[in-house]
Image: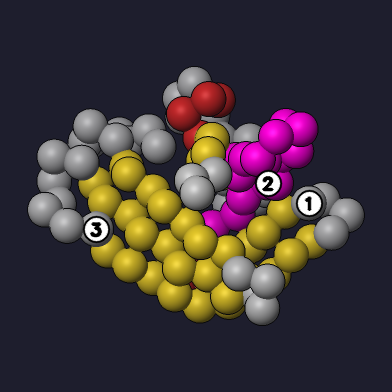
């Protein structure tokens, strides 16, 4: 993910069927190890978005069906597309 004052933000998220998540976030060049957050999320079926609870700073992600493994795209706090960098930098790819 883009970062205004670092090399980028390494982000990993695990979303579970029971509406829980684990989020790992590390500011590259500023933090030696990632910070981990766990909690619950809300799934908006109509908008196909996931919103994390307060522990996850209410981050929002759009589920994108690319016909293969699917992607998550980080959205801004209003649920709109981020505008702080190239759109592709806000995509999280599924890791197996």
Tell me what residue is drawn at x 13 percent, y 39 percent.
29
Q: Which quadrant of the figure contains the N terminus?
A: top left
The residue to which callout 1 is attached is: 48
Tell me what residue is drawn at x 84 percent, y 59 percent.
45
Q: Nearer the viewer, residue 41 or 6?
A: 41
Furthest-front residue in view? 96
Q: Is residue 75 in sight in this rendering?
A: no
- First reached walking from the N terminus: tag 1 or tag 2: 1
SS at badge 1: loop
What residue range appears in magenta?
59-73
SS at badge 3: loop
Q: Quadrant of residue 7?
A: top left
Q: Could you say where residue 64 lies in the image, as x and y percent from the top left?
A: 71, 39
Q: Quadrant of residue 69?
A: top right
The answer for how far apart the CA atoms under marks 1 and 3 are is: 27 Å
The residue to which callout 3 is attached is: 34
Task: Give yes or no for residue 62 being in the magenta stretch.
Answer: yes
**Horizontal side, residue 57 vs residue 87: left or right:** left
State yes or no: discs 1 and 3 in contact (Cβ < 8 Å). Answer: no
**Horizontal side, residue 6 vs residue 72: left or right:** left
Q: Could you say where residue 33 lies in the image, as x and y percent from the top left?
A: 17, 57
Task: Give yes or no for residue 32 being in the magenta stretch.
Answer: no
The residue to which callout 2 is attached is: 62
State yes or no: discs 2 and 3 in contact (Cβ < 8 Å). Answer: no
């Amino acid at each position: 993910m883009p970062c205004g004052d670092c090399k980028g933000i390494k982000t990993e998220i695990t979303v579970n069927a029971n509406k829980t998540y684990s989020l790992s976030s590390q500011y590259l060049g500023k933090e030696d190890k990632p910070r981990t957050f766990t909690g619950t999320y809300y799934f908006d079926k109509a908008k196909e978005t996931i919103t994390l609870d307060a522990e996850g700073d209410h981050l929002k992600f759009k589920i994108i069906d690319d016909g293969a493994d699917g992607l998550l795209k980080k959205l801004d706090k209003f649920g709109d597309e981020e505008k702080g960098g190239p759109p592709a930098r806000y995509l999280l790819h599924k890791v197996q």
